[in-house]
Image (spheres, rainbow, N blue to C red):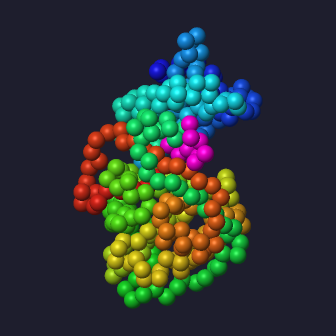
Amino acid sequence: MIRVQESQRLAAIRRLVNQSGDRDASARRLIAAAPAHGIDLDLLWASLSTAGAISQSCLAVLGAGRTAMTFLSEPGPEGDADPRSAAVERASCLDAACRELAHHSGKVGTGVMMAQGLPDPGESWSIEAYKRAGFTHVGDLSYLRRAISGFPTTPEPTWPAGIRVVPFHKCFGDDGRERLAELLARTYEGTLDCPELCGLRDPIDVADSHMATGVFDPSLWLIVLNHDKAEGCVLLSRNPELRGVELVYFGFAPALRGKGMALPLLQYAVGRTRAPSVLELTCAVDDRNEPAKKLYERAGMRRYSGRVAFVRPLRAGVGTVEERASRSPGV
C-alpha cells in the first residue's frame, strides 16, 4: 500500500468516483471542490497493479469529534476482474489508512480516535472490505424523512410535574459542551441505538460531532430538565444546502422514559424550526431500535435510504467524565 502522491492523485480519485460515468470529469470536480468541503486530498491511500497503476484507493475525510469517514473505490461497471484480490486490496488500503490516521493530528490538533464507514446495504464488496480491515459492525441504519408542511405547530405542551424544557443556550452556561457530554452519557444507558458503540467514544467527542452537524443553533437544541436535572434532549440542526432540518439526536435518561413525552416533545421541537427555507425533516435510526422507529412512524416519517455502520477505534483510552459517565455511542 502507498500514500498517494500529488502526481498520482487524479488516478486515485478516478477510482473513487462513480465508475459508470465520466470518471475524469467527476474526479476533477471532486478535486476542485475538496477545499471548500474540508477534504484533505493528502489523506489518500492506494494499491498498485503489477504495472504500477492505481488499482484500489481509499480516502479519509476528517470530521468533528476526532473522527475520520472513509470512502473506498468501487468495482467497475462489469464488476471486479478478480473479486478476491480486489477485496484484499480494498481492506489493505483501509488498514493502511487507519494505521496512519492513528498518528495524525486530526482536524483540530487533538488526534483521530475513530475511523468510520457507511456503505450502502447493497455494496457487498465494501461491507466485506470493512470486515476484513477489522472494522466493527455497529448497526444497520434507516434514514427517515417527512415534509415539514403539515407537521403540527403546537404551543409548548403541558409537561408532567417537575419537567421543564429549556433551550440549550438558556440551560447550559460556559461549560455547556461538558454538561451536554454528561447528559448524553446518561441517555445512552440501556440504549437500543448502536449499543456496540458504548465505550468506544468519549462523550465530549460525540457532543462535538453533534455540534458540527449542519448549522448549530442553540435555540433549536432543547434540554429536558427533571426537577432541574438535565435528563433528556432533542437536538435539531438546519441544513441550508438541502433546505431541511436534521434530528441530530433525541434521547431520555431512564428516569424519563415511558412517560408519553416523546411525541409531544418532538412535535414541539420541530414546530420551532419552521421557516420558509425549511422543507424537510430527516433523521437516522438503528433498525433494532423499535421504540424509536415507532415514534418516528407516528410522527409521519418514512424510510428513504439505509446504510451499514462500521467503526474502528484508532487509539486506546478515552478519558473520563464520571468515567465518561458510561461511555457513548453516536455515529
Is residue 123 one of those drawn in magenta?
yes
Q: Nearer the viewer, residue 20 or 79?
A: 79
- Residue 269 position in % (x across, y down): 55, 73
Q: Main secondary structure of the magenta part?
A: loop
Identify which residue is drawn at 49% across, 88% down.
Answer: 158
Span colored in magenta: 117-125
Query: Can residue 175 be spotted in the picture?
Result: no
Q: Nearer the viewer, residue 229 or 10?
A: 10
- Residue 60 position in % (x across, y down): 50, 35
Q: Quadrant of residue 154?
A: bottom right
Determine whether, in the image, residue 186 is placed left or right of residue 146.
left
Q: Does 271 sit above or below residue 97?
A: below
Query: Can residue 273 be spotted in the picture?
Result: yes
Determine whether, in the image, residue 313 is placed left or right of residue 52.
left
Q: Does 285 sit above or below residue 255?
A: above
Identify which residue is drawn at 35% across, 66% down.
Answer: 190
Is residue 209 one of those drawn in magenta?
no
Q: Quadrant of residue 298?
A: bottom right
